[in-house]
Amino acid sequence: MRGICRLVLLLLWILTISIFVIISSTRGWWYLTPIIAYNKPQGAFGWLFSITVFLSIVYFVYYHLINIKK
């Protein structure tokens, strides 16, 4: 299960970074803003970025702080 979670997070981060690079190089960085406004994500990139960060935090907390196997 841990390997699947890592793979999903890796794919989400690759997708997020590639969308950021492609859009910022073609239309400009300002086209993506605002990513978060009025305490909620804005647009498809904002939602993708928010979900990726949230899942990364959950993964870190679960596998590194809660489920420590020695």
Image (spheres, rainbow, N blue to C red):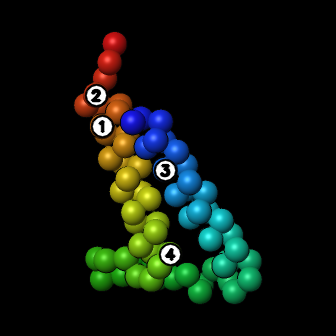
Residue holding disc 1: 62
Element carrying mark 4? helix
Q: CA distance from mark 3 to mark 4?
A: 17 Å
Disc 2 crowd rating (10 Å Cα; few below 14, some 14-19, many 20+) is few
- Answer with left or right where residue 46 lies relative to residue 67: right
Q: CA distance from mark 2 to mark 1?
A: 6 Å
Q: Residue at x 70, y 74 (%)?
A: 22
Sequence-wise, the earlier of marks 2 and 1 is 1
Name the kind of residue labelled 2 in the image.
Asn
Element carrying mark 3? helix
Sequence-wise, the earlier of marks 3 and 4 is 3
Element carrying mark 1? helix
Element carrying mark 2? loop
Sequence-wise, the earlier of marks 2 and 4 is 4
Residue found at the very far right of the displayed protein: 26
Sequence-wise, the earlier of marks 1 and 4 is 4
Relative image position of residue 34 (x, y in whole percent): 46, 82
| Towards the viewer: 26 or 38 | 26
Residue holding disc 3: 8
Q: CA distance from mark 1 to mark 3?
A: 15 Å
Q: Residue at x 32, y 18 (%)?
A: 69
Q: CA distance from mark 1 to mark 4?
A: 26 Å
Residue holding disc 2: 67
Name the kind of residue labelled 3 in the image.
Val
Are the residues flagged by discs 1 and 3 in contact, CB closer than 8 Å? no
Residue holding disc 4: 45
Name the kind of residue labelled 4 in the image.
Phe
Disc 3 crowd rating (10 Å Cα; few below 14, some 14-19, many 20+) is few
Are the residues flagged by discs 2 and 1 in contact, CB closer than 8 Å? yes
Disc 1 crowd rating (10 Å Cα; few below 14, some 14-19, many 20+) is few
Q: Residue at x 60, y 84 (%)?
A: 30
